[in-house]
Image (spheres, helix red, strand yellow):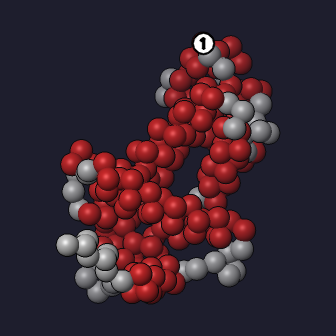
């Protein structure tokens, strides 16, 4: 790896181990095995580097979960929806520090416009990707209204379940619990009302 890649890896490690606010330039340089000056040269600032590392780590997490959920859905012995949520919950346990770093990043975004903009863009990509996976079409073909509805609800669900796992894993819902709850909610809501005529 070159210095840029080393810095991204070192920053991601620091985010997982120390969180956003407690990560210093010195921490990143030590984890990456490069000089402090390399951060300024490649990224301009600590915050710009942390943003890039965080976005990359979340993209890698998304790719990992998508692969696991696709494999789970292909296993015909399971309920694909439950199998997918089992994988999602597994990621909350295994990537706990990344999820904690994401909460830290959201708090920091209140005072960092660049971070807020990058997180907003990443969130929109997450909505589109979630919607594409659920409706079974390529991301480029997902209509904007589906991104706003299906993608937004799926993102809210992922974030909400992740928060429960971070705060109280002993009582947090399993993958089967999430799907059971969704099915009960869908039944309670019922079909969309017919438009008047």
Q: Foreground residue, 54 or 193? A: 193
Residue 12 visible in the current orientation:
yes
Quarter of image, res 194: bottom left
Residue at the far front in the pictured view: 197
Question: In this rendering, would 35 be left or right of 119?
Answer: right
Mark 1 is surrounded, within 10 Å at the Cα level, by few (under 14), some (14 to 19) or many (20 or more) other residues, namely: few
Position in image of residue 60 (x %, y %): 46, 47
Query: Where residue 85 sits in the image (x, y, percent)?
Result: 45, 73
Q: Quadrant of the C terminus?
A: bottom left
Residue drawn at the location 21% of the way across and 48% of the way down? 141
| Residue appearing at x 52%, y 61% in the figure | 156
Q: Image quadrant of residue 54?
A: top right
Q: Nearer the viewer, residue 168 or 43?
A: 168
Above or below, 126 relative to 171: above
Specify the quadrant of the image occupied by residue 185: bottom left
Q: Position of residue 58 (x, y in %)?
A: 51, 47
Q: Is residue 134 left or right of residue 12?
A: left
- Regarding residue 14, the answer to whether it shows in the image is no
Q: Is residue 29 above or below residue 165?
A: above
Which residue does the image show at 55% across and 22% down from the upper left? 3
Between 190 and 102, the residue placed more toward the observer is 190
Indicate the position of residue 142 as horizontal and vertical percent values: 26, 51
71 vs 16: above or below: below
Residue visible at 69% across and 80% down in the picture: 170
Disc 1 marks which residue? 41
Report the front residue among 136 and 14.
Answer: 136
Vertical order, 3 against 139 (above or below): above
Find numbered disc 1 in the image and state the secondary structure of the residue it sits on. helix
């Amino acid at each position: 790896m070159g210095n840029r890649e080393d810095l991204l890896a070192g920053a991601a490690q620091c985010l997982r181990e120390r969180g956003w606010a407690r990560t210093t330039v010195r921490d990143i340089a030590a984890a990456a095995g490069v000089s402090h000056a390399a951060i300024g040269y490649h990224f301009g600032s600590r915050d710009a580097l942390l943003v890039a590392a965080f976005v990359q780590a979340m993209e890698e997490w998304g790719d990992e979960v998508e692969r696991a959920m696709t494999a789970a859905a292909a296993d015909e012995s399971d309920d694909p929806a439950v199998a997918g949520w089992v994988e999602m919950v597994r990621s909350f346990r295994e990537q706990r520090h990344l999820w904690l770093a994401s909460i830290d990043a959201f708090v920091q975004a209140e005072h960092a416009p660049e971070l807020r903009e990058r997180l907003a863009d990443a969130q929109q990509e997450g909505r589109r990707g979630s919607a594409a996976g659920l409706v079974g079409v390529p991301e480029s073909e997902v209509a904007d209204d589906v991104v706003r509805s299906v993608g937004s609800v799926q993102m809210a669900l992922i974030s909400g379940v992740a928060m429960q796992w971070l705060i109280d894993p002993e009582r947090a819902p399993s993958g089967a619990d999430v799907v059971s709850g969704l099915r009960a909610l869908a039944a309670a809501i019922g079909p969309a009302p017919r438009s008047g005529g």
